[in-house]
Amino acid sequence: MKLLEKVTIGNKTLNNAIAMAPMTRSRADAEGVVSDLTLLYYTQRASAGLIITEAVNISAQALGSPLTPGLYTKEQINAWKKVTKSVHDDGGAIYAQLWHTGRVGHSVDRNGKLPVAPSAVGIKGQQHFTSQGMKDYETPQELTIADIKQIVKDYGQAARNALEAGFDGVELHAAFGYLPNQFLSESANHRTDEYGGSIENRNRFVLQVMQELVNVCGNDKVGIKLSPTVYYNNIENSDPVAQFKPLIEALNDLPLAYIHLMNGVLPLNNHPHYPENAVETFGSISKHLVIANAGFDKDSGEAELKKGIAQIISYGSLFIANPDLPKRFELDAAFNTLDHSTMYGGGEKGYTDYPFLKA
Ligand SMILES: Cc1cc2nc3c(=O)[nH]c(=O)nc-3n(C[C@H](O)[C@H](O)[C@H](O)COP(=O)(O)O)c2cc1C
């Protein structure tokens, strides 16, 4: 089974071709420090060839949701050190997913400060989960050029902190409507300076951040997650192929570890111009190792690997409920049932208490 075969990223060999997809679980403390429960949660899942952590805030400014962890204070870095050591002791590999939420946040959880974004365009028709319940989105503060340059540096510092914390590499969260994805989108980015107004300008921020991450981490230690056909969080493009093809071609020139492509997860009836299969459309033009995501099970993951575009499949919800997912694939064992009510926030229930297969 290809899923259970070793895969190499640079000089790092992964035990299998199964990645744990990044998943926010909102169990850090109010200072963004992960606890020993999080240490246990990731250690339980160390049999994944690669763990990509939940999205981790790169700065206080980046934060959008309560109880999400960070990588910008000593305490945060020290807490992650325990996680990476434990995963490595168990033979696993672990990347930190770097997060700036941009306009997908709310001032009630940002010390009263408005979220920031490429343009002062708020999200409509959705609400945001906050520590004070669901709230309408606010109109974000438009970033200045100086702000943008600072954020690029903040990503670099967070990557430096990630290496200090013992991570094998970092993944830029450029998917699902967060800040990098906002820059890539015509609906969220109305800028007329060098960061907007054309395909090349909308791609600039992501490419500058990726260059910064490579400068800090070196070759084969930086990945990126993209969701070119996900329009959640009011992310729209008149022609996603025209936007993302040059981006992926430009990423081909950087010494990356991988690109992580999330297939569309929403119906495309109202988006007939969006490609049906993002992994095929965009993965086939990447020269990097491709991680395919969204909706895979064992058989469809195996079939995807056989197509020859992706070398790794990432699994999200299956990994929440099945800490020993690779073993279950190997033995064709049944899966535990996912409890949706404990996905975000809370303690060990629905986090570290999903049973392993009996020996
Ligand atoms: C509880 C939960 C939290 C998530 N948080 C993140 C996140 O922090 N970063 C990210 O890139 N994707 C996040 N995702 C999306 C997953 O990484 C993945 O793309 C999605 O679950 C589809 O994969 P699956 O069908 O295997 O679950 C989250 C998904 C879930 C279920």
Image (cartoon, rainbow, N blue to C red):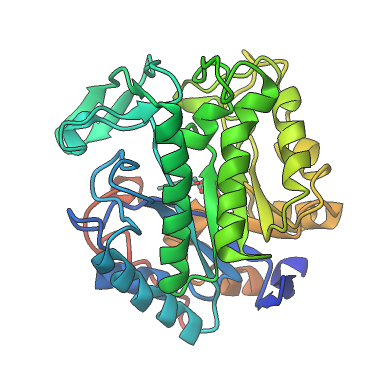
In the picture, the quarter occupied by the N terminus is: bottom right
Quarter where residue 164 is shown:
bottom left
Task: Mark yes or no: residue 226 visible.
Answer: no
- Residue at 71% x, 36% y: name it: 247
Instruction: Residue 151: give x, y in percent of width and height.
Output: 43, 42
- Residue at 24% x, 50% y: name it: 67
Looking at the picture, does residue 193 appear above or below residue 113?
Answer: above
Left or right: where 267 falls relative to 166:
right
Instruction: Residue 172: give x, y in percent of width and height.
Output: 54, 49
Instruction: Residue 314: give x, y in percent of width and height.
Output: 61, 56
- Residue at 51% x, 56% y: name it: 318
Q: Nearer the viewer, residue 321 or 81?
A: 81
Left or right: where 303 falls relative to 49:
right
Left or right: where 278 falls relative to 349:
right
Q: Nearer the viewer, residue 254 or 335?
A: 254
Looking at the picture, does residue 56 appear above or below residue 130?
Answer: below
Q: Nearer the viewer, residue 321 or 17?
A: 17
- Residue at 54% x, 38% y: name it: 175
Exactly how many numbered labels are in the figure? 0
Looking at the picture, does residue 207 appear above or below residue 89?
Answer: above
Q: Nearer the viewer, residue 13 or 317?
A: 13
Task: Mark yes or no: residue 67 visible.
Answer: yes
Instruction: Residue 62: give x, y in percent of width and height.
Output: 35, 42
